[in-house]
Amino acid sequence: MKLWLQKWRLLSVFAILALVLSGCGEPFLSGLVPAGEVGKQQYDLILLSLGIMALVIVVVVIIFTFAIIKFRRKDEKIPKQVEGSHTLEIVWTVIPIILLLILAVPTVAVTFSQGDVSAIDKKDADGNREALVVNVNAHLYWWEFEYPDLGIVTSQDLVIPTDEKVYFQVVSKDVKHSFWIPPLGGKLDTNPENVNKFWLIADSDKAEEAGNLFYGKCAELCGPSHALMDFKVKALPQKDFENWVADMQNTKEPVEPTTELAKQGEDIFNQSCITCHAVTPEAKPSGELAPNLAGFADRERVAGILDHNEKELKKWIKDPEKIKPGNKMTGTYPEMSDQELDALAAYLMELKVQK
């Protein structure tokens, strides 16, 4: 078999695989399975642009095929030439303009609609902000979520209500990152020098289909652990969200350990970890060096990527550099024995906010 034929066959296989796999998507992760108003509008624009491109390709192929069949050379006769035809020049100038307008008008309308954050500072009669606002602070390589009007700070797990417009004010505390929840809407850069704002809505039915959990990503190459800078989004019904807020606001003191091992872990934590990590969901944590650990036991992942259990937690504490190269936790505390790791993990896994 000729070499060029083998290459074309291999290329065809990859093309078919790419086409098939492009239709794969989980409701908690894929932008091709929109779960909110913003994501749906952007998905519709993708379909519109693909439809226009497909139409152009089909029309060109039809014309090309027609020309080859009808005007294939049978003799030495030259077909009628249309060079300089004003009619044809007008047609193939006007049609692209029309196609561009069909794509540009809804794109511009959606862009202005999604960029409108004027309601973010709207106040009610009592002077309280009407909208739910979340300040997103991006770090190497974790996410902090502050609810300024609710007095809550958490990290790695973003909790929002469904069927409600949530406004985000995103900023970076170090290098440029990009905040992205694929099913809910497009990404937005988090810059160290300015605050970017936008809004998202999580559809209740789509959230239920995804188990009320979506995956978020950093979409900007920010360092060696860029691909591991994940977070989770818990999209809860309004009542469940209000319960979560109440539980967080009522947690004024660190959770009391219930076992002797966890008490030992608390002592270790206070000696080695408390200078960087807060354990209460106060509005301002002890610092911006490390994630707020309030409600750590209720979270979905350890370090945003590992299964949430004591084994993975101890693996993370013992060697964070191996899990997330370039993170700022590496080398900040003395090496711990297995007994100390057991105690610290037991304490952290008791940091529950919701009973």
Image (tube, grey):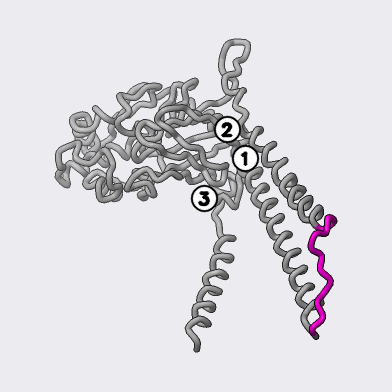
Which disc, if any, is residue 29? 3
| Above or below 131: residue 40 | below
| Above or below 170: residue 341 | below
- Mark 2 in CB contact with mark 1 (< 8 angstroms): yes
Neighbour class for label 2 at 10 Å: few (<14), some, many (≥20)?
Answer: many
| Above or below 3: residue 306 | above
Image location (x, y in percent) of residue 346 = 27, 41
Image location (x, y in percent) of residue 84 = 80, 59
Which disc, if any, is residue 157? none
- Mark 2 in CB contact with mark 3 (< 8 angstroms): no
Q: Secondary structure at mark 2?
A: strand
Q: Amino acid at mark 2?
A: Trp
Q: Which residues are magenta?
A: 76-88
Neighbour class for label 3 at 10 Å: few (<14), some, many (≥20)?
Answer: many
Q: Secondary structure at mark 1?
A: helix
Q: How many marks?
A: 3
- Of the numbered discs 2 and 1, the one sitting upstream in the chain is 1
* Distance (Cα) linking label 2 and label 3: 18 Å
Q: Quadrant of residue 19?
A: bottom right
Neighbour class for label 1 at 10 Å: few (<14), some, many (≥20)?
Answer: many
* Viewer-nearest residue: 198 or 265: 198
Mark 2 or mark 3: which is in front? 2
Q: Is residue 239 visible?
A: no
* Viewer-nearest residue: 151 or 108: 108
- Mark 3 in CB contact with mark 1 (< 8 angstroms): no
* Distance (Cα) linking label 2 and label 1: 8 Å
According to the image, label 1 marks what residue? 38
